[in-house]
Amino acid sequence: MDLNLLKEAVVEMQEEKALSLTEEYLAGGAEPLSLFKAYQAALAEIGKRYEQEIYFIPELIMAGEMMNTASNLIKPLLADNAGMTENKRGKVLIATVEGDIHDIGKNIATMMMDLNGFEVKDIGVDVPGDRIIAEAEAFGADIIGLSGLLSLVFDPMKKLVEALKAQGLRNKYKVIIGGGQMDDKACAYIGADAFTTDAIAGVNICKAWLD
Amino acid sequence: MSDPIQGEQTNKTRLSAEFECRKKRLEDAISLKKPDRVPVAPLAGIFYPTRIKGISNKDNMYNPTGTLQAWIEAAVQHNWDVALPPMLMFPVRVWEQLQITQMKWPGGGLSDDQPFQWVENEYAKQAEYDEMLSNPNSFAVKTIWPRIAGALTPISEIMQLPPLPLLYMSSAYSLPTLLGEITSQPNIRELLRTLLAIGDEYAVYQECLKNYANDAMKQGFPIVFGPMTIAAFDWVSDIFRGMRGSMLDMYRVPDKLKALVDMFTPYTIAAPMLLDLPFENKRVFIPMHRGAAGFMSDSQFAEFYWPSFKALILGLVEAGYTPVPLFEGDYTPRLKYLAELPAGKVAGHFDHIDRKKAKEMIGDTMCFWGNVPSTILCTGTPGQVIDDVKELIDIFGDNGGLIIDCNLGIPDEAKPENVQALTDAVMQYGVY
């Protein structure tokens, strides 16, 4: 068994080889958690390649697929998912705000947050601001992630931040806004703590906040 | 006492001259000849003109006559060089009749003030590639139509036949039975009534577009573009496989993905020419999605996206059309490809891009249209708009190849004073 070979197969997007090695090693009695950690190491490398602009969204999606397949094989072999839900970095509540039903960016961000050790609650699309705040409170979120592609989201996002202030909750949460039209002007208008147009950059911002 | 008839004739002559002047201004900028001044030409702005009149998005879509009138009013108010494109006034009543599932709209799954939005999904599965490639027409009618249009579900039921049954059944002996059995079924008869109603509704819609185009011309405004088409990779990714599905296809079934893209390519070129538009306009809008930075690597772009897109551009140019690609997302990494396109023939419209790199790499190839950030129009001030337009004029104005617009057309929530500032900036700084 060569865990480095498995890690490399995942990093190089060799899906069939990664699956074949995983099944072979599990059948050969390998410690399931060690395989899971090999996948995690591969995903860390994939994340680095994304930041270096060697890998792009297709590779993040492939990585998610391979991780999902591996998790489905490994989880049943572990008692109580031991080791797979170790210390989470923090909690992120994410939604596409009211008026917008786009979810591609949100779904990639959710996947990358999850793969990077955050506990993520995704409450979907077209979500009113008061529900986002209520869910963040109930979930015990550290970070509120607001997603939106359309220009109509600027005002609902701004109202949500104002509502947090009005309820004395503004300092309880970090707020990050994400979407194709987000920039420093939108961030200042909305009163968010950060903006991103890139899932991995968003993950790194969240990591920095909670480290 | 003034002669009203003479006055009307004078006005018609003035507006006709304004039409020709605006048309030339836009065409000169596109062909990299210096016009009299920088044109102000929104590519889109569907809900802005009605929102500023307090009209809901739902009323915008369900009352196109009123909406199209508001579009002309906006063009007059802001002294644009174009009228907004009627091809973006979608036939929402036909969507309703078809029970379309690929869209949600105000009054059709969304609240009255939301804009229409695409419903992302894998409408074709990866396992269905072989059938798409070998039997595209049968697959479309039998499988895709019912998935995207609930009213067409009965068709899938009558099409559950082995390949080429129609040929086998095509005789005087068998046609009466075939057609009689089909058209006697209640759900098929209901479908036929729906299709007739669609025809009636579509005729009203076409008349509405024709009237708008004529009114716009009489008011002195050329329409910003005529037909639309979509790049072949976007057809596969946007419409059928979804973003996630097509990206997995690049790894799992790349040859089938490319085969489908290749199969679509000639039709992406032909589609605008076959469209029976009720007005003449050879500028072809091409909204582009999946080729932008971040969505694929340079080598994936070169392999999967660019060849069919370049073929589309060259095909349209050869047929005498002017492509108007909307390079959505960031196209900075793709500038070297854009530089391959024929100079002065493509009206490139930009979302996000490094302006100086664009000038350096494609300044002599295509005009620079758009790119004023929507955030400034929605949340900024007229002064900020003017500063941004002035920067564009400073960078791109030297050879005349500049057209002013926001990155994706006028945002629905744009402040009117900021929209006006686009024109004010051009009048102040954009006269050559």
Image (cartoon, coloured by chain):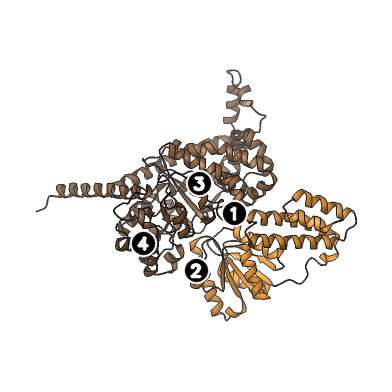
Chain colours: A orange, B brown
Task: Tell me which amino acid carries mark 4.
Answer: Leu
Callout 1 crowding tier (Cα within 10 Å): few <14, some 14–19, many ≥20: many
For label 1, the SS is loop
Kindly give the residue lying farthest to the front in the view shown.
Answer: B360
Chain-order first, disc 1 or disc 3:
3
Q: Specify the quadrant of the image occupied by residue A203.
A: bottom right
Q: Which residue is mark 2?
A: A186
Please state the horizontal and vertical placement of residue B109, each as a whole percent of the image. 54, 55
Give the distance between the C-alpha atoms of the residues marked 3 and 2, in whole angstroms: 34 Å
For label 3, the SS is helix
Task: Tell me which amino acid carries mark 1.
Answer: Phe
Query: Quick check: do tags 4 and 1 share a chain?
Result: yes
Mark closer to the observer (3, 2): 2
Task: Tell me which amino acid carries mark 3.
Answer: Trp
Q: Which residue is mark 4?
A: B422
Q: Which residue is mark 1?
A: B295
Q: Nearer the viewer, residue B400 or B159?
A: B400
Q: Residue at x 18, y 48 (%)?
A: B10
Give the distance between the C-alpha atoms of the residues marked 4 and 3, in whole angstroms: 35 Å
